[in-house]
Image (cartoon, rainbow, N blue to C red):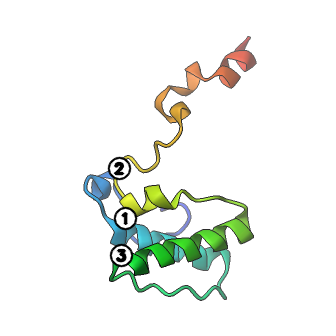
Amino acid sequence: MRSLGYPRIISVENFRNPNFELVADCLDWLVQRFDESADIDDDISTEQDRVTFLKNVSKVFMSKARVKLNIKRLYAADGYAHASHPSHHRPLSNHPATKSQIR
């Protein structure tokens, strides 16, 4: 996030416990980077507000960047939210594409 210009320092430690506020801040900042005219209500005070926020952010990412977000994982907002695919758990050197490129 630092290399993208995000103004706060973020550590994995920030996500040892669920931290939806930080996730929402990051997503809101990223949405503004993709589309300055995007008008997303950033009220996340209730569960329904958080779900609505994530759905709206997801729509912007899909339409502007062709990126599909896993909003269930984002809602959890913990240190394991990124590990939705088994390939995240093995070292790159064991990845099948890497092995075929080495040979």
Q: Which mark is residue 79?
A: 2
In percent of the image, x 57 and y 21: which residue is there?
Answer: 93
Kindly report which numbered mark, 2 or 1, lies closer to the viewer in this rendering: 2
Identify the residue at image location x=74%, y=20%.
Answer: 101
Q: Are marks 2 and 3 in contact (CB under 8 Å)?
A: no
Q: Quadrant of residue 78?
A: bottom left
Three-letter amino acid code at disc 1?
Ile
Residue annotated with mark 3: 47
For label 2, count other residues whose C-alpha is less than 10 Å away and answer few (under 14), some (14-19) or many (20+).
some
Q: Are marks 3 and 1 in contact (CB under 8 Å)?
A: no
Q: Is residue 46 left or right of residue 33?
A: left
Label 2 vs 1, first from the N-terminus: 1
In this picture, is 23 found above or below 101?
below
Q: Position of residue 74 (x, y in %)?
A: 45, 60
Distance of label 2 from label 3 (alpha carbons):
20 Å
Q: Position of residue 81 (x, y in %)?
A: 42, 50
Q: Residue furthest top?
A: 103
**For residue 52, side relative to residue 66 (left or right):** left
Nearer-the-camera pick, 79 or 91:
79
In the image, 64 versus 50, the foreground residue is 50
Count neighbours of disc 1 (C-alpha within 10 A) and say few if under 14, some if 14 to 19, many if 20 or more. few
Q: Amino acid at mark 3?
A: Glu
Checking the image for residue 9, the label placed there is: 1
The x, y position of residue 17, in whole percent, is 25, 56
Q: Is residue 84 above or below residue 98?
A: below
Counting residues from the N terminus, which is met first, the one under dot 3 or under dot 1? 1
The mark that comes first in sequence, 2 or 3, is 3
